[in-house]
Amino acid sequence: MAHTRLRRWAIGIAVFGAVAVLLSPLFFTIYRAMIFDTIPRDDYATFLLWVARSPQGAIPDSPYCYRLLTMLAALPFHMLLPVLQFSGQPQVRSIEYMQATAAIAALSYVCAILAGFLSYATARAQCGLGRRDAVLAGVLLFALCWHGQMFGIDSVSIAVLAAALWALPSLFGFAAVALLSVGFNEKIGIVLVVWLTARLVCDRGERAWVWPRWLAALSAVAVYAAILKTLNMPGNEYQTQPLGYLVTLRDNLAATASMRGILLNLLPTAILAAIATLGWGRRIGPFRAADSLTIPALVLVSLILTQMFQMGRIVMHAAPLFVIPAAAAFGRWADRAER
């Protein structure tokens, strides 16, 4: 048994490495966009340099400063990657900044692939899908990562969420991932709480199974709230002062009505809603129809707690919940079409 498990892990790592090499041009696309600042993004390079104890490092404002584990995950890439330079790049970029940016790009790229592999593993182990449908689920999640902030750390959050679903059968494993997620990105705990709250309300027959996992996810959010209260770092007053929520909601609704808002807020939300609809009603593994309520709930969260053009990427964090039922539904459709 141990030999078989070791062999599977070896095959999995080999396939992961092969896919990463095959798709490596996408890494350079991510890194190039970051170095040339062609897309608005959250810049974590100086934070990573601070973790690496570089004189050029600095602690960012809240909530970015609490994502320490993400920076620790990027640190090996910072240590191992060579300096990658492009012709015509801005001369104001220091070597240290370029190395840190390349490390974050590499982490984002690797985590997008990892999210796909974790979705594949969940589809196989928990949902009984065949290899074809499980591969489709993994590829679909990898593609949806690009609707997040691939040029930041959204794919890291999506990979951690995919890991939480993979660990779902084990309460201890799920709780460990949920609590550790606080150091990666607070959105992970919020998505888990929203999802499991919908299940508690709508699926009475599964409350005994959902309840302890909901407590674990809620504990993660409580830990983050305690960190916010204790450290009280500046920078996210619009999130910590409820009196300003109506103003944030008004500004976000106005931004969503613009062309940029349609592309960044409404289009990703509509894509994920369509995927959720494709798999709606399929009782497969741990997934149920009530999971679809996560999407409108996250829309509301993003309108109240984020600013401007964040809705699409916030909602896309819930993608791991929907790619497996959608892949299973597509697989059944394909089987019927062949008959």
Image: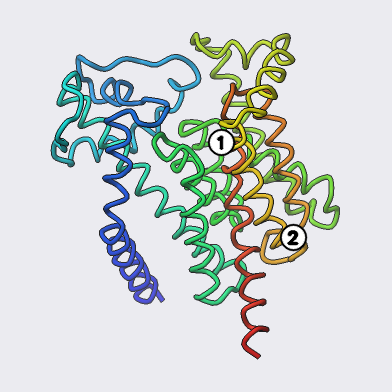
Q: Position of residue 208 (x, y in %)?
A: 78, 52
Q: In this view, does 39 lie above or below 120?
A: above
Q: Position of residue 285 (x, y in %)?
A: 66, 65
- Residue at point 38% right, 76% down? 4
Extreme residue toward the front, this view: 259
Q: Where is residue 109 in the image (x, y as percent from the top left)?
A: 35, 47
131 sits to left or right of 253: left
CA gap, disc 2 to disc 1? 24 Å
Split into 4 quadrants, where in the image is the C terminus? bottom right
Which of the 4 image quarters holds residue 96? top left
Which of the 4 image quarters holds residue 104? top left
Depth check: give the residue in front, 54 or 136. 136
Depth check: give the residue in front, 226 or 318. 318
Crowding around mark 2 (Cα neighbors within 10 Å: few <14, some 14 to 19, many 20+) is many
- Residue at point 72% right, 57% down? 277
Crowding around mark 1 (Cα neighbors within 10 Å: few <14, some 14 to 19, many 20+) is many
Q: Earlier in the sequence, mark 2 or mark 1?
A: 1
Give the residue type at disc 2.
Answer: Trp
Q: Is mark 1 on a helix, strand or loop?
A: helix
Label 2 sits on residue:
280
90 sits to left or right of 187: left
Label 1 sits on residue:
264
Q: Where is residue 29 in the image (x, y as percent from the top left)?
A: 30, 44
73 sits to left or right of 313: left
Give the residue type at disc 1.
Answer: Leu
Q: In this view, does 313 lie above or below 18?
A: above
- Residue at point 68% right, 36% down? 298
Which of the 4 image quarters holds residue 227? top right
